[in-house]
Image (cartoon, grey):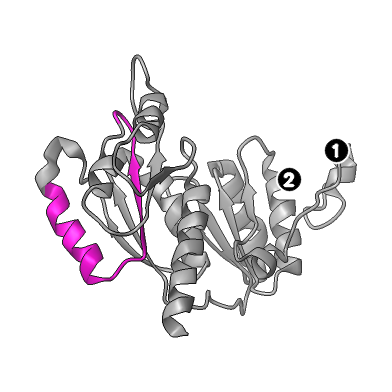
Amino acid sequence: MPELDPFAGLAAVLGVAPLHVDPTRQARKGVPEVVYAAGKPPRLTLTAVCELLAGSASGRVLVTRATSESVDLLRTELEPEGHTVLSTSGGTVAVARAGAIAPVETGGVVALLTAGASDAPVADEAAWVAREMGCRIVRADDVGVAGLHRLETPLRALRAQEADVVIVVAGMDGALPSVVSGLVDIPVIGLPTSVGYGLGGGGVAALLSMLQTCAPGLVVVNIDNGVGAGATAALIANRVAAARRS
């Protein structure tokens, strides 16, 4: 088999359909294209990243659900070229070429609350996306309903920071978003995670609980969909910020 070139022609060598990346998505829609690495061979992920870096005006790319092998390959191939590769424990990776433009702050403020420490990887994904879209993050972790008194300080903080929208991340019974939605006057995005066990585990109970909420102002994304939650929250916050400026 010929040597694989990670920067061009990999799809043809592997005998798969060519990659069709969308480097202008952020300029067109306000949301960057994100490389979803789950299920991709590490070199295919690398190829997608390289093509986006080449066509992106900002010189920045996000990767989600990256395996350790994918992260290692990105670092091995890109860091010697002067690119920066930052990764989190949850598999979210930010890649920036040398001289990349930092995200321009929009003035939008996204609050982010997690019910438990096990929800952090999905919350990280949402936070990275919202930051890439120019938002400031106000975050508090491990404030779930098993110890509801822990929620008081974070709620004060998001009000003091004048958050435009709040993402509430929860697994298990998924009760925290409903509680928060009953206490704040901004949109709440419920982000169910696949944290749980037994009947209704894998995020099913959390998702159904959030969908069945009686607290108005709560909308819900799919299980573990941190990208969707972060993008939607940032779109809301950025529109609010633009209205403030005008």
Give the mark nearest the N terminus, 1 or 2: 1
Q: Secondary structure at mark 2?
A: helix
Tag of residue 44: 2
Q: Is residue 197 above or below residue 136?
A: above
Residue ID at (72%, 53%): 48
Q: Is residue 170 above or below residue 153?
A: above
Q: Amino acid at mark 2?
A: Leu
Residue ID at (42%, 71%): 108
Q: Relative to 139, is 126 on the left or the right? A: right
Q: Amino acid at mark 1?
A: Val
Q: Residue furthest top?
A: 199
Locate residue 179: give its quadrant.
Answer: top left
1 and 2 marks in contact (CB < 8 Å)? yes
Which segment is the magenta one? 150-173
Across and down, in percent, residue 53 comes to: 70, 65
Q: Is residue 222 magenta?
A: no
Q: Is residue 161 magenta?
A: yes
Q: Residue furthest left?
A: 149
Across the whole image, how many numbered discs are drawn on residues? 2
User: Who is closer to the viewer here, 175 or 63?
Assistant: 175
Give neighbour class at mark 1: few <14, some 14-19, many 20+ (Cα, 10 Å).
Answer: few
Q: Would residue 87 be seen by someone viewing this image from the given angle?
A: no
Q: Which residue is mark 1?
A: 16
Across and down, in percent, residue 6 comes to: 77, 53
Q: Secondary structure at mark 1?
A: loop
Give the position of the N terminus as an image quadrant: top right
User: Who is closer to the viewer here, 16 or 146?
Assistant: 146
Residue ID at (60%, 66%): 30
Give neighbour class at mark 2: few <14, some 14-19, many 20+ (Cα, 10 Å).
Answer: some
Across and down, in percent, residue 44 comes to: 73, 45
Q: Relative to 86, is 48 on the left or the right? A: right
